[in-house]
Amino acid sequence: MRRLVAFAIASTACVTEAPLPPPALEALVPSTWEEGAAPEVVEIRGRRLYLEVLSSAARGAVARGLPEVRLGTVALTEVTHLDNQTLTARGLDLPPGTYDLTVSTAGGSATLEGALRVSPARTQVVRQSAAGEQTLGGDDRLTTVPITPVDPARSLLFFTYTHSSDEPGTGRLTARLTDDGAAVELERNTTWLHGTTDPAGEEVLVAWTVLELDGVRVQRGREVFGDPTTVLVDLAQAVQPERALVLTDLHIDGTYFSTNDWLQARLVAGGAQLELRITQYAPGLVVVWQVAEWSRTSGAAVQHGDAALRAAATELSLPLAQPAALDRSALLFTQVILDQREPPDAASHLVCGRLSSPTAVAIERDLGWSQVDIDLAWSVLTWDALRVQHGTTELATDQLEALVPLPAPVDPTRAVALLAGEQKQCRSAWGADDHVGVAWFALTFADGGATLRLRRGFAGEYATAHWQVLELR
């Protein structure tokens, strides 16, 4: 044998063993731990980590013993082997920091620098929250809902809504947290073009959530459009776009959904301004916006991009510059309609989005006859404090509501459910007219957070909803 030299003297067998080579380290798995939450078992991967030598003279196994494994200066315990390439050991609590991994064997030792990062223990992100749902009657223009006061500078308002209207005067809605943080204001125009009251105003179902968060700074405003199609808002404090997210919606006069009933919002001028863009001015256009910026130490990152959905296109695949962990990431986008062909159809306008993989965003729509051109501005938020569940639900032609059991139940006081398009919009093939409520959804939780409830206001065609459930610590 190459590593054994046997000598026979009388009836005694002697074994001389050749030196073994040192180990070669490849990885520690998992390589990131949270302070106070060390994994039960870790794997140490490499080569030549565990070797046995057979003694042909003794016809038995001679083990050189298990290696010693250290993270920094601390030895791991319960070291065992799976195979020659893998050791296992019990994790142990370590203070935050970066640690080298060292494995010592009979053949020598090896060190893998920076093999482990221990992050500080997570703290509660949600300070307080409020949530509810309202049904606005046909002539309800402004509804104020009192809440337990929150700090407006730390609070984000999320809302989704749906209806059966084909008129933006009654079917477009804004939600705003009041300046004192003590109420949510729901507002719409309830009018046709030129201010005439709509005699057939439709009910609107609204679901809203307010979250006061640590590590987030929020600016908000309300812009009344005059005659321009683009408004530049100077932010009181410039933000870093790679850590900032924009939320908007609008209300407006009008009798059908067209070029001035969708809005594209994005940060420009290096984060010093917010650009609000429509294609055609119409009376009564009001935009309510929020810009949230996460702190440098929050662990949040936001990627942004623009996209163009043209003519007969029904889908786009958009690459991400940096991979986004799906269980910690959510997609949002706004859109603007570039051209209007009458009469409008809902299918061409109803754009949907989802994170199709950690490296790509998928944009989709069903196509009606009008085949309008659309520009989009999208953002992907990745945040260590989030746990995100993604799913797709199909609603049948006559189905107004779907109840979806969640893979993991959530705490409704720390969670919000959204679609990517303006928080509420996905897609449908409805093309007879502009009943956008066929794929606008109000999303809430049921069964104590074990079930996601999706409701739409109009059922004339099937609809697809790519949903996202965001739960915070």
Image (cartoon, rainbow, N blue to C red):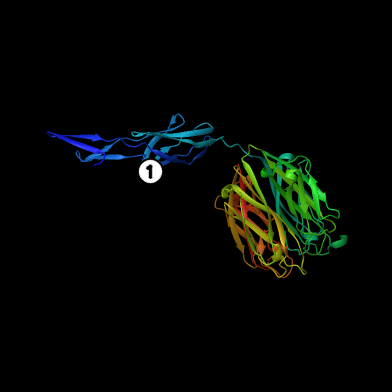
Q: Is residue 18 visible?
A: yes
Say which quarter of the image contains residue 182: top right
In this view, the residue in front, 51 or 220, is: 51
Circle 1 SS class: loop
* Residue shown at 52% from the left, 36% from the top: 117
* Residue shown at 87% from the left, 60% from the top: 195
Q: Hey, which residue is sitting farthest left in the picture?
A: 10
In this view, the residue in front, 292 or 6, is: 6
Q: Is residue 184 visible?
A: no
Number of callouts:
1
Measured from the top left, where is residue 380 in percent x and y? 64, 49
- The residue under label 1 is which amino acid type? Gln
Measured from the top left, where is residue 246 in percent x and y? 71, 48
- The residue that label 1 is drawn on is 85
Q: Is residue 42 above or below residue 348?
A: above
| Quadrant location, the C terminus | top right
Measured from the top left, where is residue 119 in percent x and y? 55, 36
| Quadrant location, the N terminus | top left
Q: Is residue 302 above or below residue 283?
A: above
Measured from the top left, where is residue 397 in percent x and y? 64, 68
* Residue shown at 22% from the left, 37% from the top: 5
Q: Hey, which residue is sitting farthest front in the picture?
A: 2
Q: Residues within 10 Å of mark 1 (few under 14, many from 20)?
A: some
